[in-house]
Each structure stands twice: as C-alpha cells, then as structure tokens.
Image: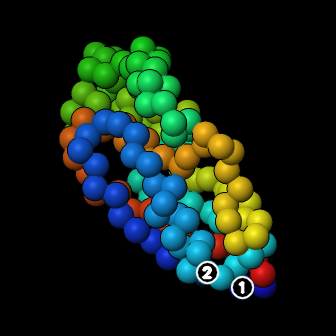
Amino acid sequence: MKILTDSFVVNTHGKGTYEITADVESIVSKSDIKEGVVTVFVRHTSCSLIVMENADSSARTDLHAFFDELVPEDTPYFVHTYEGGDDMPSHIRMCLTDVDKNVPIIGGQMVLGTWQGLFLFEHRRAPHTRNIAVSVFGK
C-alpha cells in the first residue's frame, strides 16, 4: 500500500462555498495511486466540507438560505460570541455537516457523480485562510 499526504490552503472571502475538487484531484494525480481512497480534512471548527452539486450554483444558494434559517446569526441566547455574532452559529453549522470526506479512487480518478463536487463550506462572515489536509491511500 502507498500513502501520500499533502495539504493546501483556501483563502475565503467570507461565507460561501468554495469548490476544491480540482485541488484534491491534483493531489490524487500526484500520488500515482490507481485504486484506493482519498481522505480530505479541514483543520478548523467554523467551516466544513461538503459534497454538493457543482453545475448549478442556485443549489448552493438554497443551501446557504437553509442554514441561515436553521442556525441564525446574532442570536441573543448564544454565550460563545468572542469573535462576533457569527461565532457560535459557525460552530453549530460545522457540527451539522462534516470536517472530512472520503472519496474512492478507481483508475487513478476520484469517483464522483456527474454533478458532484467537493466544497469548502465557509460559515464565517469575514475572510479566512483555511488549511486542508489530504491523504491518499491505495495501490
């Protein structure tokens, strides 16, 4: 079994979804692993990783609207607000999603559906630099 570990950063401009599929594909390609799995992990507590439709951005617009309703910002009963009114809601949104994703590799390619892409889901209003670790396992 071979293992390659790498990382990259995503500079966000605040809340939104940022596609990282190509970044991860580049690491998978560099690994020369033909059959296996890639694990992607974001090293933060106020953003997450999602697999989402990458063809029609309105799907992501609806996702943001849903989370804004589900976990509203500037909620007066939150105590953890050291970094602002979006601080605790960002942590809750992260808990409701994932900080890691696993994608199979077959024939040296990630096995994603036609309309699937990997996205960093930024939950904070301010810009951030997000660190993403990638491990590719296989043969």
Taking the spot 21% from the left edge, 41% from the top edge, the residue there is 126
Task: State the image coordinates of residue 44 (x, y, percent, origin top left).
Answer: 41, 53
Question: From the viewer's perspective, is residue 35 above or below residue 56?
Answer: below
Task: State the image coordinates of residue 18 (x, y, percent, origin top left).
Answer: 39, 46
Taking the spot 28% from the left edge, 49% from the top edge, the residue there is 12
Give the label, 1 or 2, closer to the camera: 2
Task: State the image coordinates of residue 69 (x, y, percent, origin top left).
Answer: 42, 14
Foreground residue among 74 and 138: 138
**Quadrant location, the C terminus:** bottom right
In terms of sequence position, does the residue under pointer 1 or pointer 2 come before the other?
1
Q: Amino acid at mark 2?
A: Ser
Side of 119 relative to 78 (left or right): right
Side of 83 relative to 75 (left or right): left
**Quadrant location, the N terminus:** bottom right
- Tag 2's secondary structure? helix
Report the residue marked by disc 1. Answer: 2
